[in-house]
Image (cartoon, coloured by chain):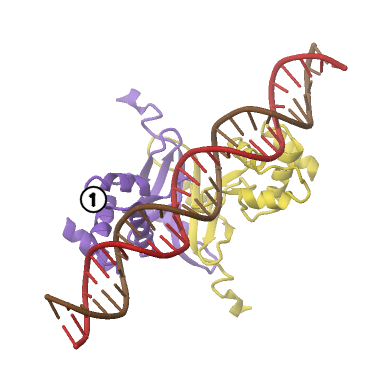
Chain colours: A yellow, B purple, C brown, D red
Amino acid sequence: MSANVQEYLMRHGIRPSLQRMAVMEYLMTHRTHPTADEIYGALSPSMPTLSRTTVYNTLNLLASRGAVLALDIDARQTRFDGDTSLHAHFLCKSCGAIHDMPVADDAMRMLRPFVPVQVDDVQILYKGVCCECYKCKTND
Amino acid sequence: MSANVQEYLMRHGIRPSLQRMAVMEYLMTHRTHPTADEIYGALSPSMPTLSRTTVYNTLNLLASRGAVLALDIDARQTRFDGDTSLHAHFLCKSCGAIHDMPVADDAMRMLRPFVPVQVDDVQILYKGVCCECYKCKTND
DNA sequence: ATTCATATTTGTAATTAGTACAATTATGTC
DNA sequence: GACATAATTGTACTAATTACAAATATGAAT
C-alpha cells in the first residue's frame, strides 16, 4: 500500500515525505471526507511530532495538484476526499455524514455549460436526510 | 417593493421587522451572492443602529425558512442568494465572482438519486474561469 | 393608555478554522 | 562532508461566526 501511495504522490509531482504519505494514505483508506483536524487527530498518536500546520500545508498541496478534492460542503470546515473520480456528494442534515453518490454519465453531459467559459470542475451536492437517520432500519 | 418584501417574509412565517425587510430586500435586488458582512456594510449607512449580529441572525432565519439560500461555495464565508429557484452557480477562480447558471430540466431529472432517501436540495457548482477573466473581451 | 409577556435587536466576548512567518530539521547534490 | 534547497514545526495572528445577556420593541389583555 505504502508503495502505491508513494507512486501516486510522485505521479502528481509531489515529493513523498513521510508526513505527506501518511496524510494521503489516510485519505485513501478512509472515505469519510474528513476534516484537516480529524486527519491530524488520527495520525498524531503514531506520529507524535506531526504538526497541525503540516497537515494543513499537505492538504493544500495535495488539493492544488489534484491528488485530493477539497470539498466546501460544510460551511465551517473544509472536508477532503481522496477519491478524485467523478461522483456527487450527499450531506445528511441530521447526522452530518457525507456519502458518495453516483452521477449518471448522460446527466453529466447535460450539465456541460453552453457559455464559452473555461470549466475545470463540476460539483454536485445533495442535501437531505440519510438512510440511517430516516429510519430505513424499519425495513431490515 | 417594500410591500412585496413584507408579504414574502410573512408567507415564509417570518415577522417582517425593519431589519429583516432590509436584509431581504437587499438580497432581492442584489444578485451578487453577497456575504453577511457585505450586506451589513451596505445597509449600515442607512441603518446606523443595525448590528452585525442581527444580520447574521436574520440570514440564518431566512435560510432556515427557505426564504433565501445559504451557499457553501466559498470556503471562507457563507454567501447568500435571494433567488431560491432552481439554478446552478459558477465560481470564477480568477476574480472570485459567482454567476448564476441555468440547469437543463432533463439534466435535473437525471440527477434525481435512486436511493430511497429524503432529498431536500440539489446544489450544482461549476468552477473555472469566467468570461471576463478569460479575455472574452478580445471578441468584442 | 398601562401593564405584562414575548420577540427582536444589540454589543461584547468567546470560539475556532485556517494562515503567516520564522526557526528548525531533513533532503539531495556536488 | 558541505551546502543549497525543501519540508516541517510551533507560535502568533486573522477573521467569520456564534454565545450570551442586556436593552429595546411589539402586541395582547385589562
Dividing the picture into quadrants, the one containing residue A65 is top right
Residue B8, how many percent across, how many down?
Answer: 24, 63
The residue that appears at 77% across and 41% down in the rendered structure is: A4
Report the chain holding disc 1: B
Dividing the picture into quadrants, the one containing residue D12 is top right
The residue that appears at 53% across and 59% down in the rendered structure is: A91
Circle 1 is placed at which residue position? Answer: B47
Quarter in which the N terminus of chain B is drawn: bottom left
Residue A3, how many percent across, how many down?
Answer: 80, 40
Camera-nearest residue between D29 and A78: D29
Visible in this render: residue B101?
no
Q: Relative to residue B27, is residue B3 drawn left or right?
A: left
Amino acid type of disc 1? Met
Q: Relative to residue D11, is residue B31 drawn left or right?
A: left
In the rendered image, the vertical position of residue A13 relative to residue A88, given as above or below: above
Camera-nearest residue between A22 and A118: A22
Visible in this render: residue A13?
yes
In the rendered image, the vertical position of residue A107 relative to residue A51, given as above or below: below
Q: Relative to residue A96, is residue B134 drawn left or right?
A: left
Residue A23, how many percent across, how many down?
Answer: 70, 44
Camera-nearest residue between B126 and B139: B126
Packing grade of label 1 (10 A; few <14, some 14-19, many >=20) is: few
The residue that appears at 73% across and 40% down in the rendered structure is: A19
